[in-house]
Structure formats: structure tokens, C-alpha cells
Image: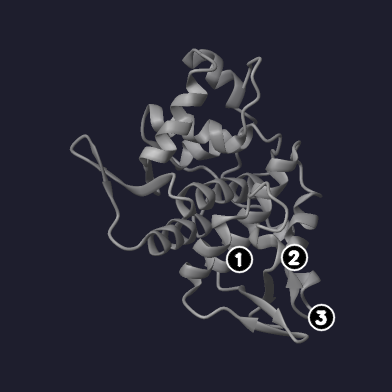
Amino acid sequence: MTSEHSTTLVEELLSWVSDDWTDAPGVFSVALRSGARDPQELRDLSLGLLVHVVANDLAVLGEIRTGRHVPWPGTPAETLLRAVQDWARFPTPRVSIGDLFWLDTTPAGEAIGRSVRGRWQLTDEEDMAETSGPPLPAAWSAAPTLRDKVIRRCALGPLPVRALVQVAAAGGVRTQEAVQVLALGMLAHLVAQGSLVLGDQRDGRFVPWAGTPAEALLRVGRSWLSPEEGTSTKDTTWFDVTSR
């Protein structure tokens, strides 16, 4: 975003959602600002943004009916996993308006979004020029992804989730925030696919968390981007693959 003020990807997303409801293409447009251009990375960046704003009660998922946002039924954990699964299964990188979900801000998310919008003003034309990116392919590439690298690294046993951050750092993003968001999105994608489980390391062994995958995803997303040392779930959480 062209501005004398620095905004994070999360802030930019909330500024969009607070201005008007935002769908999957809108989240994808914010992900483009990270510098990534690989469609797989952009989707996982988008998933990371989605997990953060929903898990931290900054936005709610739903659909548009008769001109208003209607939240999906279910708990935040259930609706979040539904959205991540739907996007992870989507057959093409080309997501159209309203294909998957619509986001609306909570009061906390709207306050952040409006604060950001007060710092800058962009015309629609400038906005489009900033976020257009290269044309997306019609189908997903069969080339190995960063998620595949995560699975390979876990072949010998459980790993701390910071391993996802190390893998994400090899992607095409420009900032540390984008690396963290990409890592969270990769984790969400793999949880949604049933490829990994989250847990703790106790007495030298991996212990999966009690509860559903949806609850685990919400739990890890709540403090993933925490700036305070020792308060992020990245500091204590481990993961293991579901099959070897």
C-alpha cells in the first residue's frame, strides 16, 4: 500500500472488512501485498490471515443474504475450519467473488480497521494497481509446495511448530510478519487436510491436544502473531504428521 504510514497485513485486511464485507478474493488481494507470487503460497498466506482474524475475534465468517451479512451457524472454531477446508479443497487458484465466504468485522476488528483507514486514503484505481499481481493459472501446479517440505521434515518424528516458520522463510515473502502469517496458513491447511495434529512435548514424547481439530486450530491461531516473547503458541506447541 502506498502510504507514508506502515500497516501490517492484518491491519490492511481489517481496513477492507470494516469498510465493506470482504470475501476470499479480498483476502487474497491483501496477501499479494506480501511480495509472494506463487499461488500456493498466496493461498496459505490468505488462510493465515483468515485464521488470525477469526481466532482473535476480529472478524466473523458468513454469507450475504438480502443485503446483509449473516454469520454461519456453529462455533468460531467450527466455522473457521469449514472455511479453511473449503479453500484448501478449492479446485483452482482463481477464486471468484462470493465463492467461499464473506467476512464481517466484530467491534474490535472494526475499531482497528477504521483506525488504519484514518491514516491513508487510496482511490479504487490505485488500490487495484497495487494488488493486481500476475495472472493466476487455471489449475494448481503439481510441483512440490512448502507444505510438502514440512511433511518431509516431520518424517522422523514430531517437531515444534517453529519449524513451519523456518520453512515459510524460504518462500517469496518480504517481511517477518508475512513469514509468520504464511507459516500459520500452512499449518491451517495441513490441519484442514488431516495431515497433522497439534500437541505438546511431555517427558520426551508427543502428546496430542484433547479436543477437535477445529478447536486446536482456533487455539493455535489466537496467539500465533503475539509480539511478546514466550506468549505465542509457537513457543510451546508441537506437531506430528498423521501418517508415515
Decide which of tag 3 and tag 2 comes sooner along the chain.
2
Badge 2 vs badge 1, beta-carbon distance below 8 Å? yes
Q: Residue at x 59, y 19 (%)?
A: 129
Amino acid beneath label 1: Leu
Front residue of this view, candidates 123 and 177 = 177
Badge 3 vs badge 2, beta-carbon distance below 8 Å? no
The residue wearing badge 3 is: 156
Dot 3: what SS?
loop
Q: Quadrant of the C terminus?
A: bottom right
Badge 3 vs badge 1, beta-carbon distance below 8 Å? no
CA separation in Å, label 2 and label 1:
9 Å
Residue 74 image-quadrant placement = bottom left
Tag shown at residue 190: 1
Decide which of tag 3 and tag 1 comes sooner along the chain.
3
CA separation in Å, label 3 and label 2:
12 Å
The residue wearing badge 2 is: 150
Amino acid beneath label 3: Leu
On the image, the x and y values in percent for residue 202 come to 71, 83
Q: Residues within 10 Å of mark 3 (few under 14, many from 20)?
A: few
Front residue of this view, candidates 184 and 153 = 184
Dot 2: what SS?
helix
Residue 188 image-quadrant placement = bottom right
Name, please, the residue furthest toward the left.
66
Q: Compared to 199, does 104 lie above or below?
A: above
CA separation in Å, label 3 and label 1:
17 Å
Q: Compared to 54, does 214 lie above or below?
A: below
